[in-house]
């Protein structure tokens, strides 16, 4: 049986064998299905020109703002760190259940010398009285000498500037004097500290035990109530003296 297709002839596909009429109808259908392009109106063109004009100025301004923020950021960071440090300091002072934590009171005595009272906590009992926990009193005396008194508990009378200390009262003075007693009362206005209980004083002079004492910082007076015992430091040797101190 012979093949009717002549040799070297291109392949024939029945799906491309369309007449001109069919091709014209398909083109007309495609042309009818396409949507016409609507040209923008004058108002739309005006809006586009306005947006382009604003973008031409806004983009460079934004870039300049970003560069400026990079330049000033170190100063902003310094201010943030400073504020953080201030907040950390303020966090040390808190008010919880009527108690002031990290309390500090400042004032001046009758000779216009400053004093300062600090405490871990303070509880206001009345408008005049403050109960303190672990109070410390810093006092300047005549000649700008310094004295620090601390204890476990205390009562501060604000208007009278009186501080009553109880519980392991310890006094330090910059001349090397250290005194310990169970209780002590301080008149911050007059610069006087006194106690009617036993006291042990240690310093460059030696050691003194007594039944009570009175120190006037501004007058430079120290009185001890006997009977007492005094052990003096001496180059020739230490010796003890017992008697009634006054």
Image (tube, rainbow, N blue to C red):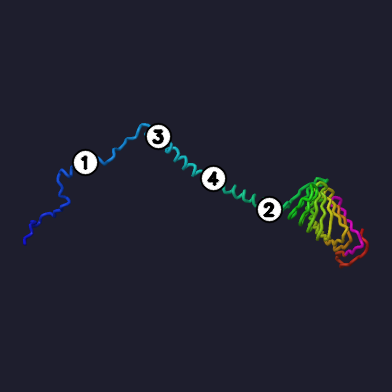
Q: Which residue is found at the position 18% from the left and 44% from the top?
A: 23
Against 59, is 221 above or below?
below
| Label 3, residues with CA under 10 Å away: few <14, some 14-19, many ≥20 | few
Q: What element carries label 3?
A: helix
Frontmost residue, 78 versus 203: 78
Q: Residue at x 17, y 44 (%)?
A: 22
Residue matched to label 1: 28
Which residues are drawn in magenta? Answer: 217-230
Crowding at mark 1 (Cα within 10 Å: few <14, some 14-19, many 20+): few
Given contact means CB atoms under 8 Å apart, are the residues at marks 4 and 2 in contact? Answer: no
Q: Distance between the residues labelled 2 and 1?
A: 87 Å
| Residue bearing mark 4 | 72
**Cα–Cα gap, marks 1 and 4:** 68 Å
Instruction: Give the CA separation, mark 4 to mark 2.
Output: 31 Å
Q: For marks 3 and 2, give the CA distance.
A: 59 Å
Q: Name the residue under label 3.
A: 47
- Helix, strand or loop at label 4? It is helix
Instruction: Please check the rendered image and state whether residue 133 is part of the magenta-colored stretch, yes or no.
Output: no
Q: Do the residues labelled 1 and 4 touch (CB within 8 Å)?
A: no
Query: Is the N terminus in the top left, top right, bottom left or bottom right quadrant?
Result: bottom left
Mark nearer the N terminus (3 vs 2): 3
């Amino acid at each position: 049986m012979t093949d009717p297709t002549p040799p070297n002839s291109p392949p024939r596909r029945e799906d491309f064998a369309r007449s001109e009429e069919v091709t014209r109808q398909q083109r007309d259908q495609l042309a009818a299905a396409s949507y016409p392009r609507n040209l923008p109106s004058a108002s739309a063109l005006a809006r586009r020109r306005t947006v382009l004009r604003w973008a031409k100025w806004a983009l460079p301004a934004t870039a300049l703002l970003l560069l400026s923020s990079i330049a000033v950021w170190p100063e902003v960071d310094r201010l943030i760190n400073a504020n953080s440090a201030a907040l950390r300091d303020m966090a040390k002072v808190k008010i919880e259940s009527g108690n002031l934590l990290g309390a500090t009171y400042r004032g001046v005595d009758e000779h216009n010398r400053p004093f300062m009272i600090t405490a871990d906590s303070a509880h206001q009992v009345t408008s005049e009285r403050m109960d303190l926990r672990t109070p410390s009193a810093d006092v300047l005396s005549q000649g700008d000498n310094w004295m620090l008194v601390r204890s476990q508990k205390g009562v501060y009378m604000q208007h009278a500037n009186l501080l009553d200390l109880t519980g392991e009262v310890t006094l330090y003075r910059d001349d090397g004097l250290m005194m310990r007693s169970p209780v002590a009362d301080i008149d911050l206005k007059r610069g006087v500290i006194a106690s009617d209980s036993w006291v042990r004083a240690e310093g460059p002079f030696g050691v003194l035990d007594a039944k009570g004492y009175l120190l006037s910082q501004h007058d430079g007076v120290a009185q001890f109530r006997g009977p007492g015992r005094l052990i003096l430091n001496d180059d020739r040797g230490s010796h003890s003296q017992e008697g009634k101190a006054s």
